[in-house]
Image (cartoon, rainbow, N blue to C red):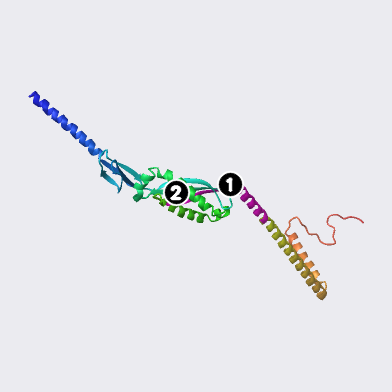
Amino acid sequence: MAASAQKLLGRLGTIGVGLSIAGGIAQTALYNVDGGQRAVIFDRFTGVKNEIVGEGTHFLIPWVQKPIIFDIRSTPRVVSTITGSKDLQNVNITLRILHRPSPDKLPNIYLTIGMDYAERVLPSITNEVLKAVVAQFDAHEMITQREVVSQRASVALRERAAQFGLLLDDISITHLNFGREFTEAVEMKQVAQQEAEKARYLVEKAEQMKIAAVTTAEGDAQAAKLLAKAFSSVGDGLIELRKIEAAEEIAERMAKNKNVTYLPGNQQTLLNLQS
């Protein structure tokens, strides 16, 4: 009976080992592809398969096959370069690129470029395209026609990236700087323009003051002529009228002043002095 029990325990141990091996094999035969990802299968006998595996849980042959997971969501990357403009000015330009691999090009990308496709491709093609586009504009046009520069760079860069199986969702110029000499020249030009505007303003102000003075003098001369004409026609009556009006105004103002006292005429009220 002891022998039978020992034999049964041995069979149970063999079954447990078999189940463990089967579980391990089943676990290694499954792999997951998460949302926003795609997989390419590498087969040890046939190489990289052209089939693109979508999201979900999938089977593979353990040891023979291996899944290569790609992230197909847009990823930002900043690329900076220094190039020359049409008028031979140094331009420091920075692009922000949202890129992702084309899902149907993943097997070719893995075979020809590798998993680090962005580091291998984007800097080189960005420098190439920017040098070609920036050379078509001078420094002044780079500032005033920035949208045109960005559009041309975007079109050329998308065409170039498509040759490597990359999709560029957005391309924007984030920084645009020029050399120190050009920056100093622009600042000096702005100062000169401001001084010219100030000088022109002073000239215009002087002209306006001159015109105002002439107009005032003409008005005074015309008024003098009218007064002379009035005097010749009516005599000194107008002058007497103006004196009376001025006297009334002065009397009205002094009457309101508390420090003014009125004394009768031809009378000494303070001192009786003998002659």
Question: Label 1 belongs to which residue?
Answer: 179
Determine the image quadrant of residue 198: bottom right
* Spot occupied by residue 124 in the image (x, y as percentages of width and height): 46, 46
Task: State whether residue 95 appears in this view.
Answer: no
**Where does the N terminus fall, quadrant-wise?**
top left
Q: Secondary structure at mark 1?
A: loop
**Where does the C terminus fall, quadrant-wise?**
bottom right
The kind of residue on which mark 1 rests is: Gly
The kind of residue on which mark 2 rests is: Ile
213 sits to left or right of 180? right
Q: Which residues are magenta?
A: 169-196
Question: Label 2 belongs to which residue?
Answer: 97
* Spot occupied by residue 15 in the image (x, y as percentages of width and height): 16, 32
On residue 92, which mark appears? none
CA distance for labels 1 and 2: 24 Å
Q: In the image, is residue 175 part of the stretch drawn in magenta? A: yes
Q: Secondary structure at mark 2?
A: strand
103 sits to left or right of 202? left
